[in-house]
Image (cartoon, rainbow, N blue to C red):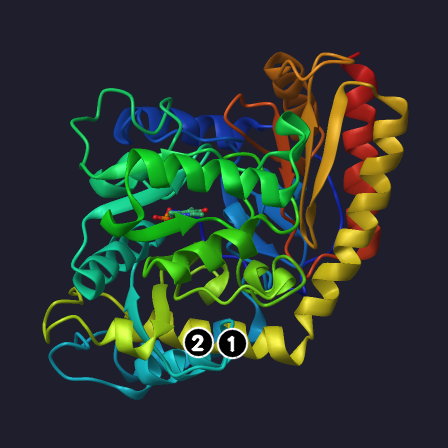
Amino acid sequence: MTDSVAGGPSLPQERRLVTEIPGPASLERLDRKKAFVADGVGTTLPVFVVAAGGGVLVDVDGNSLIDLGSGIAVTTVGNAAPAVARNVHAQVDAFTHTCFMVTPYDGYVDVCEKLAQLTPGDHAKKTALFNSGAEAVENAVKIARVATGRDAVAVFDHAYHGRTNLTMAMTAKNMPYKNGFGPFAGEIYRAPMSYPLRDGLTGGQAAARAIDVLDKQVGAQNLACIVIEPILGEGGFVVPAPGFLPALAAWAKDNGIVFVADEIQSGFCRTGDWFASDHEGVVPDLVTAAKGIAGGLPLAAVTGRADLMDSVHVGGLGGTYGGNPIACAAALGAIEEMEGGRLTERAREIGAIMERRLSELRAVHDVIADVRGRGAMMAIELCKPGTTEPDAARTAAVAAYCHKNGVVVLTCGTWGNVFRFLPPLSISDELLDEAFDVVAEALTATM
Ligand SMILES: *Cc1c(COP(=O)(O)O)cnc(C)c1O
């Protein structure tokens, strides 16, 4: 065990390398990981963290790395954010668990009330809380099936919805998420996604193509729900062409199909709006949220039309830990940070900086086929120059350079050739610029 070190925004905000990455103390721990942790649980950058906050992660060797990943879009408000830490401490001292299904408490209801206000649309809304994003997606499907009396579920190419059996079936990519783990849940149908770099279609054309597949191969009358990420997460941060989401939502409405926005990665200020659906004024019937919702504690939610949510019989939704009091206290702290810190605006500012830096890089490096994203959810896709042939090898080389030089970057995409940049919104402009200086060096060094 390592003694805990105070983290949060008061940590020195600097990139500081005192050893190789990973350093000797991390390498020692990596041996212990190898001995005791299942190999199936991989690690992107094996530095063992002792403190984090603002825009940095500090490791056991004393290195301070710039964080462009936020633990996969989770620590949007920053690590150990003050209001999160304060609320968690207070809740831990009061009580840690009762199970909301046995004896309830205020924090759960407070989070549900906040979600009714913050999610798109001003209709009557209700919420059920869970532990993980996958669990939220599963429950959205359960609710849609009961509400409609139908079985079929529509999902999209490049989708990522989780690692449980139903959500593996809903996820598109085989390796590493699905390979060997079947048989998968049935009644899942996949439609083509709008992918402007690769299909050249307008939003309307891409929606017509998807609707045609669903209508002819499944039948609108058999569909319980359409589940879609308004901006693809693991699948490559693809922003669908304008008009795609509104056209799908309208078709769903006309056909009594529940429209579910999986905002687990794109929600909670990440894109410069509270939810990515807000950008085009799309009002989903159900929204799934997780990741950024609770400043790092495990919490997930399904929020949506009260009539749909209430179609499930009493006792049909829940779980031992869903809406744990500490996780709810953390969520209320994270929401306080987001509202007080005007983090939707901050996400837009960060997005503008990233877009400028990435566009400059694209002008110099023809391996960058696309710069895309919204707010603090930006990406570049790397392809063989002049083509759309994915360049996963170059992507891996650039990532390795960044990691060695103290910048935590994440890749994604069906072909593993996309960098996704997800800095905590507590990062400073200076650190962000320094991180992109390293990304620029990495692109040059790997030419
Ligand atoms: C991460 C993610 C999930 C799964 O969430 P977990 O908490 O890892 O189960 C589902 N959907 C999207 C869009 C995600 O990004």
Q: Which residue corresponds to the image point at 61% horizontal and 12% vertical from the top-left?
A: 393
Lateral position of residue 331 relative to residue 256, left or right:
right
In the displayed structure, does residue 344 sit left or right of residue 121? Answer: right
Up/down of 171 relative to 334, above or below? above
Q: In front: 2, or 73?
A: 73
Residue 422 screen position, x and y as percent: 63, 47
Secondary structure, mark 2, is helix
Judge left or right: residue 309 versus residue 410: left
- The answer to whether one can see residue 238 in this image is no
The image quarter in which residue 419 lies = top right
- SS class of the residue under badge 1? helix
Q: How many neighbours does mark 2 have within 10 angstroms: few (below 14), some (14-19), or many (20 or more)? A: many
Q: How many marks?
A: 2
Where is residue 95, by image quadrant?
bottom left
Extreme bottom residue here? 106
Q: Is residue 309 left or right of residue 70?
A: left
Query: Which residue is the site of mark 2?
Result: 115
At which x and y percent is residue 9? 66, 64
| 184 w.r.t. 341: above or below | above
Mark 1 surroundings: few (<14), some (14-19) or many (≥20) residues within 10 A: some
Q: Tell me whether circle 2 and circle 1 mark residues in contact (CB < 8 Å).
A: yes
Depicted 126 relative to depicted 243: above or below: below
The amino acid at mark 2 is: Leu
The residue to which callout 1 is attached is 118
**Does any portion of residue 119 appear in the rendered image?**
yes
Residue occupying image coordinates x 50% and y 76%: 121
Residue at image location 34% in from the left, 31% down from the top: 41
